[in-house]
Amino acid sequence: MSNSRVQAGVSRRGFLGGAVSGLAIAGVASGFAPAFAAPKDAFIDGLIAKMSVEEKAGQLSLYSDPVRTEAATFNPSVASVPKTQMLADIAAGKITGLFNGMGVALGRELQKAAVETSPHGIPLIFAADIIHGMKTVFPIPMAEAASFDPELSRRTNRVAALEATACGLHWTFSPAVDVVRDQRWGRTAEAAGEDTWLACQFAAARVKGFQGDDLKAETSLLACLKHFAAYGAVEGGMDYNTVEITEQTLRQTHLPSFQAGITAGALSVMSSFNDIGGVPSTGNRRLLTDILRGEMGFKGFVVSDFTSEEELILHGFAADGRDAAKKAILAGCDMSMQSGIYMKYLPDLVRSGEVPMSVLDEAVRRVLRVKQAIGLFDNPYRSLDAKREQTQLRLPESLALAREAARRACVLLKNDGDVLPLKKTGQKIALIGPLADDLNQLNGYWVVFPDTRKDITVAMAMRGIVGDGNLNVVRGADIDAPIPGGIDAAVAAAKAADVVVLCIGEGQEMSGEAQSRTEITVPAAQQALAEAVAATGKPVVVVLSHGRALALEGAVRNAQAILCTWFLGSEAGNGIADLLFGDHSPSGRLPCSFPQKSGQEPFYYNHRATGRPQLSETDINYRTRYRDASFEPLYPFGHGLTYGRIVYGPTQLSADSLPWAGQVTVSVTIANSGTRPVHEVAQLYIRDRVASVTQPIRSLKGVRHLDLAAGESKTVTFALTRADLAFVGLSMNWQAEPGEFDIWIAPSSSAGTSARLKLLKA
C-alpha cells in the first residue's frame, strides 16, 4: 500500500514561491525525487557553445510534419510551414522535430538532412499523438482504466510503442494523467477517471509501457505527461476553460499523478491550455519552474500544447507574439509547438537582453539531454527500420491483447433477471442500433493513423457465433438523426426476436478534445429508438458506446441489462461478444461515477462531507441534494457486476489501533455463491472522520484482483500504514493526524461494511 502511494512533501511556498520542504512521514517520499538527473555533459555543452542563437531557437521549435502527412486532422487550422521551407530549415538546424507524420523511408530522408547537412548534425525527434494504439487500437484510456489493472495498461502501451517506433516515431504526447471531476469535459476519454490514487497507478504504468526498460532501445517511445496542470478541473467541463481551485486541491488531487509519471521516468511534460487563478499554465513560472522542477524534481523538458504559448495573447496575458514568447520561455516552457513564435522572436529577445542567454541555453540543454537520453546522438536512425515497419504491425499477439483489453474494459452496470449471458443456440437475437455494425465507430477519439479494414464490429463477432439465421441486424437510427422507417424496422425485428441487443450511445466524434457537452445523455434519435424497442416488451440488453460517463434516461436506464463498453478499438466486437455469450465474465469497474442527471456535474464519489448531508432516503429537507435528484450517483465509482453471486464479509482489522510507525492488516472474505467463475476487483477505502481539513467521504487506497470459481471463497488482505492516511494540510505539507478512520474493503465506493481504526500519536 504505502509503497505504491505517490505523494510528496511540499510547502505552501512551493506554489507561491517555489520553496522545497521535506516530509517526516514514513512511507512518503521526503520531497519529490528526480526521475532523470543527467550531470553536466561536455558533449552537450560543447554543442551549445557552438550554436548560433537562431539554431538554439530552432532546437526549441516543433512543427507538424508537412512531408509525411498520413495523420488524421485533430488540431485547429494554423499557418503551416511549407514543405520546401521546412526542408531548408531542417538543413539549417532550425527545427528540433516534427509531429504527426509517419513512415520510415521519408523519416530517414528527413533525419539524413538534419544529421548530414545541418551545421551541428543534431538529429530530429519524431513525435505523434499515440494515445491508445498505433495500428492495433486498444480501448480509450478511460476504458482501460475500467480494468482497474495498471499492468494491463503497461502491456497495451508497450505494444503501442512497438508499433509506433516501427513506423518511425520516437515520442508520444501521452499519457494524459489529468484527474477528471466533470464528465461534460470531452477529454475525460483520455484520462483514468476521477480518483487520484487510480490515476497515479495508471500514470506510472503507461509511462513504463511506452518507454520500456531502456530509453535507447529501438522500441522505446518517449512519454509525455499532460496536461500540466489541473486541466481536468476546467470550469463547467468546458475545454480550454479557466480553472479556479485551492492550492490544497491542486496539491492533493491534481499533482500526484504527474509525480507518479515523473518517478516512473517520464522526461517530457506538456503544459495545459487552462489558466489557474488567472495565470495561463504555459506562462506560469510558479507552476513550470518552482513546482515542476524545484519541488517535483523534473529534469526533462516542457513542451507547449498546440500553440498554447501563442495563446497567451488571447488569454490577455501577453501583448503580442514577442511578449508571449518571452513570458513562456521565462516561465519554463522549453519547446514551442507549431506556432513558430520561439523561432521568430527568441533571437531578438536574447540579443536585447530581455531573455538571458542562460535561460535559452538551459532550455536547449534540456531538449538535447533528452535527445541524448533516448539514443538519438548515438544512433540518429533508431526506430527508422524498414523491416520493422513491414513486420511488427497488428501482430496476432497484439490483436489478442487488444481483445483481452476490450473485454476487461467493459463494465456490467445491470443484469436483472440474468438476461446475460446470451445463448449461443436456440435464441433469436435482434441486434439493433447505429453502433452495432459501423467500423468507423469502434476506436473513439485520438487515433491518428486509423486502419479499420480488419477491425471487428459487434455484428461481425455475433454472426460468427450464432450465424445469420439467429441474428437480425437493424440500424434503426443514425447517431444524431432518425432514419426514415428505421424505428418501424427495429420494432419489427424486436417483436420477432427472443432478446434485443441495443447498440447505442455516443458517436466517437462526440467525446475527445473540443467535444464538451452540456447534456451527457444518449442522443435523442437513439433514445427514441430505445423507447420504441422497449415498448415491445422484449428483454433489452443495452450495449453502450461512449467516451465519458452518461446520464441514462427512460428505456435505456430501465433496460434489463446494461453493458458499458466505451470505445474499445480494433477488437471491440470480439471483446464484447466474449462477454455477451459468457465465454468470460465481466470484470470492469467504473473509473468515473455515472450521474442521475447531467446537472449533477461536476460529480465524483470522493467529495467532502457537508454540514447537512442527506442521511437517509426520507431525510430530504434542508439537506445537500437537488430538488429533483438526490446527491447520489446512478452508478458509483468502482461499480461493476460479474456473472457470479459475490458476497463480501465484514471488513476485519488485525488491530483496532495503528501505531504511528506501525501497520495493520485489513482483510475480508469474498465468496462466489454463483454457478460461474468470475474475476473480482476488491477495493480498499478509508475515511478520516475528523481532520484539520475536511476530507473525502471515502478515498481509494488499494485494489486486489482475485479469481473465484463457482462456490469458492477467498480472503484478500491489505497492509495499511500512516502514509495511507495522509492528506495535504493547512501548511500545504502532506501529513497524517491521530484520530479515528473508517476502513472498507468493498466492491464499490458506496458498498461494504466498515471497520473503525484509530491512528495513535507518536
Image (tube, rainbow, N blue to C red):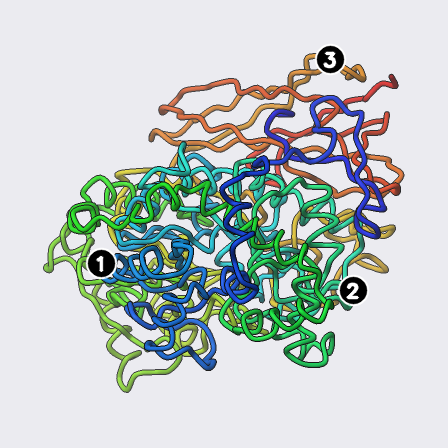
Residue 265 shown left or right of residue 606 in the figure: left
Q: Residue at x 73, y 13 (%)?
A: 655
Task: Give x and y (percent) for residue 458.
Answer: 25, 57
Task: Give x and y (percent) for residue 107.
Answer: 28, 59
Q: Which residue is mark 1?
A: 429
Q: Nearer the viewer, mark 3 or mark 1?
A: 3
Q: Secondary structure at mark 1?
A: strand
Indicate which disc residue 655 carries: 3
Distance between the alpha carbons at the discs numbered 3 and 2: 45 Å
Task: Give x and y (percent) for residue 750.
Answer: 63, 42
Task: Give x and y (percent) for residue 233.
Answer: 67, 60
Q: Residue at x 37, y 52 (%)?
A: 139
Residue 104 shown left or right of residue 84 in the figure: left
Q: Is residue 36 above or below residue 498?
A: above
Q: Secondary structure at mark 2?
A: loop
Q: Amino acid at mark 2?
A: Gly
Distance between the alpha carbons at the discs numbered 2 and 1: 55 Å
Q: Is residue 204 above or below residue 485?
A: above
Q: Residue at x 46, y 29 (%)?
A: 705
Q: Secondary structure at mark 3?
A: loop
The reply to whether residue 437 is visible in this rendering is yes
Residue 569 shown left or right of residue 234 in the figure: left
Q: Mark 3 touching mark 2, by CB under 8 A?
A: no
Q: Earlier in the sequence, mark 3 or mark 1?
A: 1
Please name whichever residue, 273 or 663, is drawn nearer the observer in this view of the structure.
Answer: 273
Q: Residue at x 72, y 26 (%)?
A: 723
Q: Which residue is mark 2?
A: 277
Please name whichever residue, 667 or 692, is drawn nearer the observer in this view of the structure.
Answer: 692
